[in-house]
Amino acid sequence: MRKLWKVRKELKTWNKEVFGSTQTRKDVLSARIKQLDDIEGGPNWNDIFLAERKRAKDEYANVLLIENRVASQKLRVKWVKEGDANTKFFHRILGARKSKNVIDRIQLQGGEFTEESSRIKQEIVDYYRHLYTNEMDSTWEINGINWGAIMGEEASHMERSFSEDEVWARYFFEMDKAPGPDGFTFAFIRRSWGVIKGDIMKFFEDFHSNGVISRNMNETFICLIPKGSHVGRIEDFRPISLVTSMYKLLANVLAHRLKVVLQHTIAMEQTAFVPDRQMMDSVLIASEVVEYARKRGLQGFVLKLDFAKAYDRVDWTFLDYVLQRKGFGERWRLWMKGCVSSAHYSVLINGRHKALLKDKGV
């Protein structure tokens, strides 16, 4: 999508030289409005000045609206109403958020703390490089269980060609979610659909044929968000992946297809994250089992497993093996491999990014 990258470059220039100078525009308009107010009622006052003042006031109101939209998009405060003059509030909150997300002190693996910027960056990079490096030469063979394989017709339907309607429907979701390295949201691309839909559908056609995603399409920023007010270790930060708009769109389309067959291949005991199933069902069943054992004086124990960084530790060969045993076709497996293995990761540390290599995790 070279066109989008060119648009991004031009938008940066436009924002710097024209759009972004909202305070200057407000100052000029405010001064002109005051000047017109001062001469109102005088001998030189006429309908031309009246119309000019109305235009200036309308433009001033539009600049305020733009400022609020920009601020609310940065903050993604969903309850903001268009036209509310809350710019000061927005910038106070935005400033507080930036301050909160700055990593100025961290605990090293040896236990000591450091405030040195270069050591903080290196410690974070080393941590994630170790986390995402696969140190095992894995081969898999698991038998004796019911894999719940999907039917051949379902597998074929999952690999059908992408239609324009299918792709367009995904733009109605997550319109203003945080953008990734390309800087574009679904809202922008949806507005530009008539111009760029041919390029987007070409991207989907190419992916359907070869399962390959180019590097600039699958760049990912890992943004570290503090889990609480007191953070010291790297584990106290929650990594949030910010992906490009095109990869987000592709993943959304694929996930929507996958939802259709999940309930056919995932055992009924798994109640979370499956359509038409409720997580609370498992809680109720567990509660009933414990109560049953308690009333009858039965001995036993309850085991709760919590895998740290579970998704980050998924072996790609294991993922492909599971998909194969569950009946997914070669093309779908190729797509999944392309999605997880073509990503190029960078971790954001105080606004700057450091490249990472990754050969496991989803």
Image: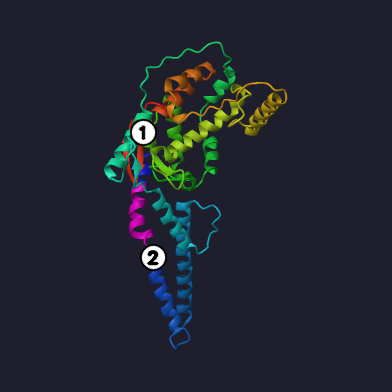
Which residue is depicted at the point 55% across and 21% down? Answer: 155
| Spot occupied by residue 234 in the image (x, y as percentages of width and height) | 38, 38
| Spot occupied by residue 194 in the image (x, y as percentages of width and height) | 48, 45
Confirm or deny contact between disc 2 and disc 1 (CB under 8 A).
Answer: no
The span picked out in magenta is 8-24
**Mark 2 closeness class: few <14, some 14–19, many ≥20 residues within 10 Å:** few
Instruction: Return the residue nearer the eye: 156 or 337.
Output: 337
The residue type indicated by label 1 comes to Tyr
Q: Is residue 73 left or right of residue 216?
A: right
Q: Judge whether residue 66 can be spotted in this image.
A: no
**Outermost top residue:** 144
**Outermost bottom residue:** 43
Residue assigned mark 2 = 23
**Mark 1 closeness class: few <14, some 14–19, many ≥20 residues within 10 Å:** some
Quadrant placement of the N terminus = top left
Query: Closer to the camera: disc 2 or disc 1?
Result: 1
| Spot occupied by residue 343 in the image (x, y as percentages of width and height) | 38, 32
The residue type indicated by label 2 comes to Gln
Asked if 211 appears above or below 79 in the picture, the reply is: above
- What number of labels is visible? 2
Which residue is depicted at the point 33% across and 38% down? Answer: 108
| Spot occupied by residue 316 in the image (x, y as percentages of width and height) | 43, 23
Residue assigned mark 1 = 128
